[in-house]
Image (tube, rainbow, N blue to C red):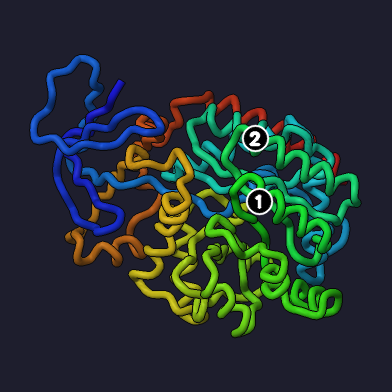
């Protein structure tokens, strides 16, 4: 059944033009929206009154980690990490090794719910579960689709757990890409051998897709690359053809020199910044200077709220980045551009968010950026439509039993934490 959003004010996500109209939302991955002057008398159309509310394209997350969903509130690691590599070893690599299919499903369902409730209908995810690799991407995809969220997934291929796990990661990736859109996941340069990197690039070419990899998140990534390969990380990726596709995503990119930035600026790849994760791990600050225009935003598993991520990037960037009111919004929306340019499915114009934003000041095209940075928050999300279907209403996900999923997630979290001990 099509949905008519009655008397809402539509904000064009690209031009920021405000238009008050009735909006007919068509169903399906190929559905669109139509502006109507009159309300059609069609019993097959469901009408929702949006008087006084704002309607715009829903949001997308450029870099997430479903596998971190059950980490909130867990106990301290066996050793207090003293640097980024120890954070990985004693926290995240301990956690991902403990994951099993039930935990992965609970993590994915919760992530989908949290994303949708914050207006995010499309998630680009980078997954790792070394002791539960086989079928893990299908579990995540099924959970997302059950909730009504769209996705672009990959498995984090790495050599850190031995050659058998490397091959399983490659096999899982190839198996998944036979029937789904997705990317070729790699952890980071310092855990990926030349042989594995070559295999990943070949797989990307085979499936006409891109690489999704963490790049220079910490100085240690560069140090390892220089000591073992005699070049810096971006130079190594370029040498092996990993920067040839406009579908490729490089996460973080904090510790780059001018030559690496020049290489990236001259390539079609995309960079995704993750401000709050960088702050949490004390690895440095993102600076877009010299990187070009292909920069988008993610949450890196910290949470699922892209409006929050945008604000963090703006405020931290006042001291460390070349970011302004217009560019923070551009980066926020650039995941849309990435998906559209590369013809990925399920993020068309019938993915919408309705905002109940009762501002005490005028709100229009001319001052939109000020409201985006200082006003709009996920608490203002009252309705979300994914592929033309109503999936969130009054802050509640309609597609799944949210209470039951949260109850199970808590049980799976307890199991996970015990295994980590």
Viewer-nearest residue: 380 or 150: 150
Task: Give the residue at x 60% y 44%.
Answer: 182
Task: Give the residue at x 78% y 40%.
Answer: 171
Marks 1 and 2, the one that precedes in the sequence: 2
Give the spatial CA distance, label 1 vs label 2. 12 Å
Element under disc 2: loop
Q: Is residue 243 above or below residue 31?
A: below
Q: Is residue 265 above or below residue 379?
A: below
The quadrant where residue 67 appears: top right
Viewer-nearest residue: 240 or 91: 240
Question: What is the residue that sits farthest to the bottom in this orientation?
Answer: 258
Q: Where residue 210 sits: x, y (%)?
A: 60, 54
* Residue 106 appears in the figure: no
Viewer-nearest residue: 16 or 207: 207
* Residue 95 appears in the figure: yes
Q: Where residue 41 sits: x, y (%)?
A: 12, 19
Q: Which residue carries the number 1 mark?
A: 204
Horizontal relation, residue 265 to residue 44: left or right: right
Viewer-nearest residue: 28 or 209: 209
Horizontal relation, residue 58 to residue 155: left or right: left
Q: Where residue 184 sits: x, y (%)?
A: 67, 50
The quadrant where residue 137 appears: top right
Task: Give the residue at x 57% y 59%.
Answer: 245
The quadrant where residue 221 appears: bottom right
Q: Where residue 4 sits: x, y (%)?
A: 22, 29
Question: What is the residue that sits farthest to the left in this orientation?
Answer: 38
Q: How many marks?
A: 2
Crowd around label 1: few <14 · some 14–19 · many ≥20 (10 Å) = many
Quadrant containing the N terminus in the rendered view: top left
Element under disc 1: helix
Task: Give the residue at x 73% y 77%.
Answer: 232
Q: Which residue carries the number 2 mark?
A: 178
């Amino acid at each position: 059944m099509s949905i008519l959003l009655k008397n809402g004010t539509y904000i064009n996500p690209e031009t920021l033009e405000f238009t008050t109209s009735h909006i007919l939302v068509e169903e399906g991955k190929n559905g669109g929206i139509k502006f109507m002057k009159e309300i059609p008398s069609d019993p097959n159309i469901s009408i929702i009154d949006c008087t006084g509310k704002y309607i715009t394209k829903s949001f997308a997350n450029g870099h997430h980690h479903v596998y971190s969903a059950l980490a909130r509130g867990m106990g301290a690691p066996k050793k207090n990490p003293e640097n980024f590599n120890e954070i990985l070893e004693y926290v995240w690599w301990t956690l991902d090794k403990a994951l099993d299919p039930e935990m992965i499903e609970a993590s994915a369902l919760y992530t989908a719910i949290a994303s949708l409730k914050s207006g995010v209908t499309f998630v680009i995810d980078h997954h790792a579960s070394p002791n539960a690799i086989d079928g893990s991407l299908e579990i995540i995809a099924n959970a997302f689709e059950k909730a009504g969220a769209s996705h672009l997934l990959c498995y984090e291929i790495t050599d850190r757990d031995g050659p058998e796990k490397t091959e399983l990661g490659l096999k899982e990736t190839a198996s998944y890409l036979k029937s789904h859109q997705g990317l070729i996941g790699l952890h980071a340069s310092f855990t990926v051998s030349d042989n594995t990197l070559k295999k990943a690039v070949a797989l990307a070419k085979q499936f006409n897709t891109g690489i999704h990899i963490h790049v220079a998140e910490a100085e240690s990534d560069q140090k390892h690359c220089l000591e073992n390969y005699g070049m810096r990380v971006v130079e190594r990726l370029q040498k092996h053809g990993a920067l040839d596709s406009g579908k490729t995503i490089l996460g973080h990119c904090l510790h780059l020199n001018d030559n690496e930035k020049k290489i990236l600026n001259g390539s079609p790849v995309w960079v995704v910044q993750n401000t709050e994760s960088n702050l949490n791990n004390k690895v440095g600050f993102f600076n877009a200077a010299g990187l070009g225009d292909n920069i988008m935003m993610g949450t890196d598993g910290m949470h699922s709220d892209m409006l929050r991520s945008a604000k963090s990037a703006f405020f931290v960037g006042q001291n460390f980045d070349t970011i302004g009111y217009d560019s923070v919004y551009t980066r926020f929306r650039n995941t849309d551009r990435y998906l559209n340019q590369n013809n990925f499915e399920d993020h068309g114009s019938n993915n919408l968010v309705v905002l109940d934003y009762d501002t005490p000041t005028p709100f229009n095209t001319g001052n939109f950026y000020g409201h985006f940075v200082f006003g709009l928050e996920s608490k203002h999300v009252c309705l979300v439509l994914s592929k033309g279907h109503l999936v969130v209403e009054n802050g509640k996900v309609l597609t799944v039993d949210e209470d039951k999923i949260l109850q199970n997630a808590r049980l799976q979290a307890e199991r996970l934490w015990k295994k980590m001990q």
